[in-house]
Image (tube, grey):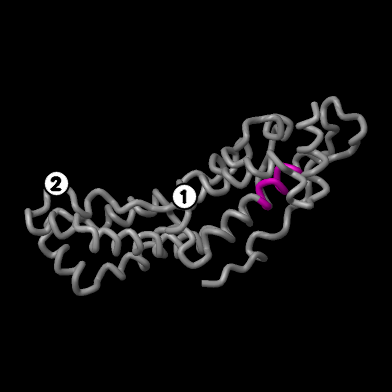
Amino acid sequence: MIYHRRAVLGLGAAAGLLVLPGCSSLPGLSLTEAVKRLLTVSSQNAFAELLQPNGFFDSQVARISVPDSLGGSRTTDIANALLRSKPIQDRLLRQVNRAAEQGAELAAPIVAETIRNMSITDAVTIINGGPRAATSLLRGQLGNTLVDRMLPGICNGLRLFDNEIINLVLSQATNVDFSTINRDVTSKVNDAIYRSIGAQEEAIRANPRATNDPLLIAVLGARKAY
């Protein structure tokens, strides 16, 4: 799977030029633009990692767990034992994480577009907020959009459950509801994407110079100095 960084490049025109409080040496910096730049770099870095082969599976932040219903207590004894066996659980774990990649591929351009067009009413609060304040703003503006848009891609990825062994097990597990499984995995992918973006934001705030971005270095570096 190839991730095109251009999917999340580009920012909308900044609204209003602000002076960072207490930093008269940085006149005319746009804090609105800085928030958008922070989110753009954070999301670029997050998706670049997630969309690598096994990006979700190998991530300590974003790995998706197998839904409880795939091996829950209401299955038959035989199906329950098979579903909970390590070989089957390993295959299910890898499959849900491969499906997550398909969902994230659909999410990346939506996140980029939202950042370009997002309304930021109080950029100062976001800049001076917690280590993941910008990510929280992004999630609030997107609402359930990513879940709804990723669902078809994740459903397609989960169809690969239809292999001979797992299909045999699931045929004995009469309580398995694939629509619920699809929603469960999609919701987990949604959470994992924001965790990943948030982790990148936190890292950038801690060391803005690593971005080589003059605006982020100026704004976040000045914030750390005061």
Which label sits in the foreground, 2 or 1? 1
Dot placed on the residue nearer the N-terminal end, 2 or 1: 1
Q: Position of residue 15 (x, y in %)?
A: 78, 42
The residue indicated by pointer 1 is 60
Report the quarter where the C terminus lies.
top right
Q: Which three-letter amino acid code belongs to the residue tagged 2?
A: Ser
Q: Is residue 112 left or right of residue 218?
A: left
Point 67% across, 42% down: residue:
119
* Mark 2 surroundings: few (<14), some (14-19) or many (≥20) residues within 10 A: few
The label number, if any, that marks residue 143 in the structure image = none
Q: Is residue 174 left or right of residue 112?
A: left
Q: Position of residue 27 (x, y in %)?
A: 91, 36
Q: Is residue 214 magenta?
A: no
The residue indicated by pointer 2 is 73
The one nearer the camera, 187 or 84, is: 84
Point 24% across, 73% down: residue:
163
Q: Which residues are magenta?
A: 34-41
Marks 2/1 in contact by CB < 8 Å: the verdict is no
Q: Is residue 36 magenta?
A: yes
- Snapshot quadrant of residue 170: bottom left
The one nearer the camera, 80 or 215, is: 80
Q: Position of residue 12 (x, y in %)?
A: 74, 53
* Mark 1 surroundings: few (<14), some (14-19) or many (≥20) residues within 10 A: few
Point 63% across, 64% down: residue:
7
Per the picture, the main secondary structure of the magenta-coloured stretch is: helix
On screen, residue 182 above or below 32: below
Q: Position of residue 168 (x, y in %)?
A: 14, 69
Q: Is residue 143 left or right of residue 210?
A: left
